[in-house]
Image: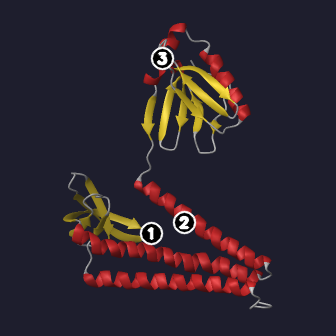
Amino acid sequence: MSIASPVPVLRSSNGTVLQLDEDALLLRRTSEELLIPLRAIRRIRPEGRAVAVELTAPAGTAPAVHRVDDVSEAAVSLFADTVNAALAMRTEEAGTVDGSTLVISRALTESREERRKRRRRIWAFAVGLFHFLLALAVGFHGEWSLALVILLVGPTFGAGSIAFGAMGADHVYRQWYLPRHGITVEAGRAGDARVLGGRFGTYAYTDLHGVSRSVQTRSGAPTVQVAYHPDRPHVAIVREARSSAAGDAALTVALLLFGVAVEGTVITVAVGAFLGMFPGY
């Protein structure tokens, strides 16, 4: 049985979504997704700006209920009317089963790469918003030239250098920590890859759980040594010579100091603009 009438998608303020998906309702929360067949539903109860999906249950037992709060009242009314009209077409026997046993649940988890990308987007947005608001405040104070300088220099040279320095610091820490407290194995060359125009070697190894993994590094050697975390095997590095590690550490410190100096200058310029230290700039 499919419903031809247009049914609104109910979306709450916390991101929960309830929608009709052919012969079932799809309830999607932050951490899980429920597929509720229409034959498992007794009725849809509109409750103002909330909706309750009441499941079928044998006589004498309390039915399970799934609620979605803080949604459009008009959308709830139309959603409930349309779905309830479809439910009314079922046979009586369909309403006596335990609907909760027919619900299919699936956990929703982000991959490590998705979490990393999401954190980067949040930080990039926060940094950009900070510099934009700071430049806007300086501009409204009458120093639009300084505002433009802040907007161009701050995120690009200040925050950018700090971001690259932070990534470098993480790499330097792993170069120190993993060879001492992790597991070191030999990885064999499995191919080549191009990253941002550069040529990298791909090296494969198997962790202690029997999972095949790979790393990429600038090397032409047939094998390299890889150190990985015993509890988090995805955290791995290619061991570098001490001279290379020292160079990475020096570059990291330089990037961090440069970024902090630029950000300090940007804030000093902004404060000076508010105090009228740059008249006629």
Q: CA distance from mark 2 to mark 1?
A: 22 Å
Chain-order first, disc 2 or disc 3: 3
Q: Name the residue that disc number 3 marks.
A: 61
User: Which dot marks residue 115?
Assistant: none
**Relative image position of residue 6 (x, y in whole percent):** 68, 28
**Relative image position of residue 270 (x, y in whole percent):** 69, 83
Circle 1: element type: loop
Label 2 with label 3: CB-CB less than 8 Å: no
Kind of residue at disc 2: Trp
Q: Name the residue that disc number 1 marks.
A: 196
**Relative image position of residue 259 (x, y in whole percent):** 52, 82
Kind of residue at disc 1: Leu
| Any part of residue 4 in sight | no
| Quadrant hosting residue 87 | top right
Q: How is the image coloured?
A: secondary structure
| Quadrant hosting residue 69 | top right
Q: Nearer the viewer, mark 2 or mark 3?
A: 3
User: Which dot marks residue 123?
Assistant: 2
